[in-house]
Image (cartoon, helix red, strand yellow):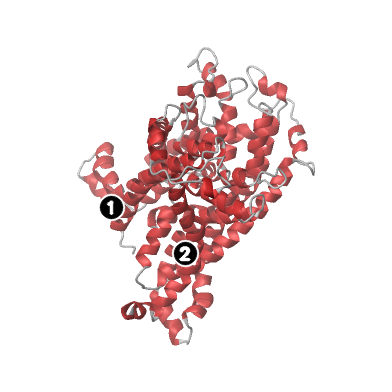
Amino acid sequence: MISRKKKLNGPGKMGFLFSLPAVIYMLIFVGYPTISNIILSLKNVNVFNFSRPEAQEFIGLSNYVELFTDANSVMSRAILNTLIFTVASIFFQFIIGFILAFLFSKKFPASAFFRGATMISWLLPVTVAGLLFKFIFASSGGIANQLLMQLHIIKTPVDWLLNGPTAMVAIVVANIWIGIPFNMMLLLTGLTTVPADIYESAKIDGANKLQTLFKITIPVIKPAIMSVLTLGFVYTFKVFDLVWVMTKGGPINATELASTYAYKLSFEQFEFSKGAASANILFLILFVVGMFYIKLINAEEEVM
Amino acid sequence: MKRERKENTISFIIGVVIFVILMFPLYWMIVTALKTQVEIFQVPTPLWPKNLTLEAFQSQFSESSATMKGFKNSFLIAFSSMIISTVLSIPAAYGLARFRFNSKKLLILFFLMMQMLPSTLILTPLYIMFSKVGLLNNYLAPILADATLGIPFSIIILRTYFLSIPKELDEAAAIDGCNPVTSFFKIMLPIAKPGVIVAAVFSFVYAWGDLIYGITFMTDPNMRPITSNIYNYVQQYQTLWNATMAFGLVAIFPIVLIFIFMQKYIVSGLTNGAVKA
């Protein structure tokens, strides 16, 4: 007791008091719901006993078990889809973002303008971006089909959003468009930290461009690369709006993600406890990757 | 010299090509909003409107339309949420940047973690909580929920601004007789102003872009934010693309304005928030 009181005294106490309102707010509106979601997932709350707490009971881990064993459940499918969606999105976003970061790290006429303007896709409400791509990939009137046919890549129009695999391609393409600026800007910031004289000495040593890239640039900006990849994973893994607007998880669960499935369970089937359980599974995966990210930035610069 | 110039020209040309490709979806949105339905479904559809029409926009701007109602609702929700988020984040970031105390490391971790949580995790409990206290179909529900998106991000970026202020300023302020509270208002806050703007901008953008809280907590069509309204509009009018795109343009209008006037702040926010933490 005494030692605790002592520690909280002095100027340090002020720092704690300054942060207290935000901490309390987040505990009420995020901390409490998170714990209550865990409790909810261990109960059997659905539309029938939602308003009658006396009819709700603890059923242990049954919801979790059923999510993976029940024939009607698409939980495993949703996790697999989320993984495919995330890995495919990040792979292309990162490569395109990296190339753009390289290009825009050079000073050429209007480079700042081009770099700045491309940022807009990251800021737009995802709902609107989703609708835009829903239209772009529409079976009739969609510009994707028209362009691909004019380029003779496809012969007949493709029903992009009505077939499983092509629907996945469509949502990934839309997500790549949204995520490119994020990758580009973070990698660009990383590139500006590479000292120019390293490149000079590499040139003198006779290194070619590819050698310079793999032996110098990538190792030096590795912290930025790791940040982009882990943060990108977290942000992509929890995407909801985009898919909800474009496909709603369809056709026949082909683009069902962990987030859209959790939403459907809770607010379409009113299986609140099952929805909570599936959201917790999503949370657990994000938590592990998130901890990895935090460890990473902690090691990178002793921030704390 | 000559070689450099040639390289510049090549970079410029690549820059133009990338710009055109990345901006095409936005261009397509604008062009579609200006077309007639007939032109939209024409094969091949023209790449620019032959019969330019503002019809699709006119229907958006009538007083009773879902567009304008949604716009007002979104503005109220995003603005209030931004105020809550900024007012709570500034002192928290200051406290976590300029003081040493035991639980500091833990609190920073706490906010970093909060930034990564999926909305679906807290959605059902918040729904139950809000329904118990009668906040469903009340603007407070999305306002309170949206602020949880802005707060962690704001604290993390604002903290980097407060960290960058030299320690000597604290000492000078203390000698002049400022206590931590007065030096916060008189010295720290003015210096951290760019950071405050970034935090406010992002809190607004996050709240404006929210869909999941809006569709879950607000079932009254008159009270829904614009993102929920456009979502419902598309469910109803599946292929009315010119009107949908006009609706979308109205929905992104404030974001585009913010983007044009605040680009400098947005870029710094994006990079500071994610890399430095």
Residue positioned most to the front: A54
Q: Quadrant of the N terminus of chain B?
A: top left
On the image, numbered disc 1 is attached to which residue? A197
- Left or right, B210 with reference to A3: right
Q: Nearer the viewer, residue B116 or A25?
A: A25
Can residue A79 be seen at all in this image of the molecule?
no
Residue beneath the point at 51% across and 12% down: A155
Chain letter of mark 1 equals A
Measured as percent of width and height from the top left, residue B185 is found at: 53, 75
Of A226 and A127, the residue lying toward us: A127
Q: State the quadrant of the C terminus of chain B.
A: bottom left
Q: Which residue is mark 2?
A: A23
Badge 1 amino acid: Asp
Q: Secondary structure at mark 1?
A: helix
Q: Quadrant of residue A101?
A: top left
Label 1 Cα neighbours within 10 Å, binned few <14 / some 14-19 / many ≥20? few
Q: Residue at x 52, y 50 (%)?
A: B125
Q: Is residue A50 above or below residue B40?
A: below
From the viewer's side, name the closer residue of B192 and B27.
B192
Q: Is residue A219 above or below residue A79?
A: below
Q: Select label 1 or label 2 by which is in front.
A: 2
- Image location (x, y in percent) of residue B153: 47, 56
Q: What chain does mark 2 sit on?
A: A
Q: CA distance from mark 1 to mark 2?
A: 45 Å
Residue A104, how many percent across, how many down? Answer: 43, 44
Q: Confirm whether residue A194 shows in the render.
A: yes
- In primary-sequence order, the first of circles 1 and 2 is 2
Query: What is the secondary structure assignment of the residue under circle 2?
Result: helix
Q: Nearer the viewer, residue B252 or A75?
A: A75
Can you say whether B222 is above or below B200 in the image?
A: above
